[in-house]
Amino acid sequence: MGRRRKGRDISGWLVVDKPAGPTSTTVVNKVRWALNANKAGHAGTLDPEATGVLAIALGEATKTVPFITDALKAYEFTVRLGIATNTDDAEGEVIATSDLRPDDDAIKDALGKFIGDIQQVPPQFSAVKIDGQRAYKLAREGETMELAARPLFVEQLLLVDRPDADHVTLEMVCGKGGYVRSIARDLGQALGCLGHVRELRRIWSGPFEASEGLTLAQIEEIARTDALDAHLLPLEQGLQDLPEVKATAEGATRLRNGNPGMVIAHNVEYGDEVWASFEGRAIAVGRFKAGELHPSRVFNQPTLA
C-alpha cells in the first residue's frame, strides 16, 4: 500500500467570516481540505452559533497562534433582557424570567462595573475542565457546578443600539479568555432583569477583521485553486504585536539552527520578547539579550527571492 499524502507544506493565515452553525473545528477542517494543507489550527474558538472572524493558521503560522489568542479582540452582541437560560445563550432552556426592563441610562451605568480587570465565572455550559471532564458534559448530565472565577481584561464595553425594550446591543473589546455569555448573564443580574446572549459576532481579533474574511461559500467555490492561495496572509501577520528586529546573515543561520543569533535592534529593551526577520521573512521569536535573539520558536520557511 502506498503512503497517504498529507497535503501541502504551506504557511500563512486565512481569515474566515464564520457563519452560525458549524463548530470552529469544522471550519478548520474545511479550510485544511480547501487548501490541501498538511497542518492547520485556529486562533480562538467561537461557539457554534457565533459568527465573525475566525483566523486559521496554516503550517508554520501555527507557531504564532498564541500571539493572536493573547491579543485584544472585539465582539458585537445582542442581549435578550428578561430571560435567563441554563446556557446563557438562546440555545438553552429558560430557567427564570423578569418583567423588569431597565432604561438606557441604567444599562450604561451598569456597564462600568464590567470594564477594566474583572473576575468572571464561566458559563455552566463551557469547555472549562472539572476533575478532568468538560463542564458542558457534566451540565448536560444535569450537574450544577461551582466554577471558579477567572480574570478578564475588558478595555471597552459600549451600548451601541437598543432595538426595543427587550434587547440591547453591546460592543466589547477584551483580552484573552473572556466569555461574552457571562457578560450578558452578569449584566442582567446586575440590572435585576436577567439576560442572555441572543446573537454574537466577533468583529476583529488582533490584526484580523471579519470584514476582510472569506465566507465558507466563497472558500468552497475556489477550493483547491490558486485563487484561494492568493487570499493567504503571511505568517508575519501573527507577530504584529511584537517588536521586530533584523537578523544579520550569520545571525540568521544560527537562529535557524535554534541557537542565539546576532540581530540589529532599535527601541528594544533587554529581555523583551521580539521576532527576528531576514530578507523579509520571519526566522524566530525569542528574547533579546545583549545584541542577540535567544529563540523560543523557529520558523522553517524559505527566504523571499
Image (spheres, rainbow, N blue to C red):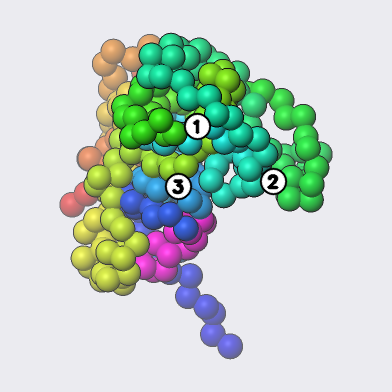
* Count of marks placed on residues: 3
Q: Write down the residue under mark 1.
A: 81
Q: Amino acid at mark 1?
A: Leu
Q: Give whichever of 130, 288 is nearer the camera.
A: 130
Labels 2 and 3: the sequence-earlier one = 3
The residue mark sitting in front, 1 or 3, is 1
The overriding secondary structure of the stretch rendered in magenta is: helix
Pointer 1 or 3: first along the chain = 3
Tag shown at residue 136: 2
Badge 3, how many Cα within 10 Å: few under 14, some, many 20+? many
The structure residue drawn at horizontal position 43% and vertical position 54%, both measured from the top left corner, is: 20
**Residue at (67% x, 23% y) in the render:** 149
Which kind of residue does numbered mark 2 sit on? Tyr
From this view, report whether residue 109 is shown above or below residue 41. Answer: above
Image point 33% across, 34% down: which residue?
163
Q: Residue furthest left?
A: 305
Q: Position of residue 249 (x, y in %)?
A: 28, 36
Kindly report the distance in space between the C-alpha atoms of the residues bearing marks 1 and 3.
19 Å
Does the stretch in magenta take in 185? no
**Helix or strand or loop: what does disc 1 sit on?**
strand
**Rendered location of residue 135, percent (x, y):** 72, 42
Which circle marks residue 50 in the picture?
Answer: 3
* Local SS, label 2: helix
Identify the residue at horizontal 22%, vertical 49% (top origin).
304
Mark 3, secondary structure of its residue: loop
In percent of width and height, residue 17 lies at 33, 51
Q: Say which quarter of the image contains residue 231.
A: bottom left
Mark 2 vs 1, N-terminal side = 1
Q: Which residues are magenta?
A: 22-36
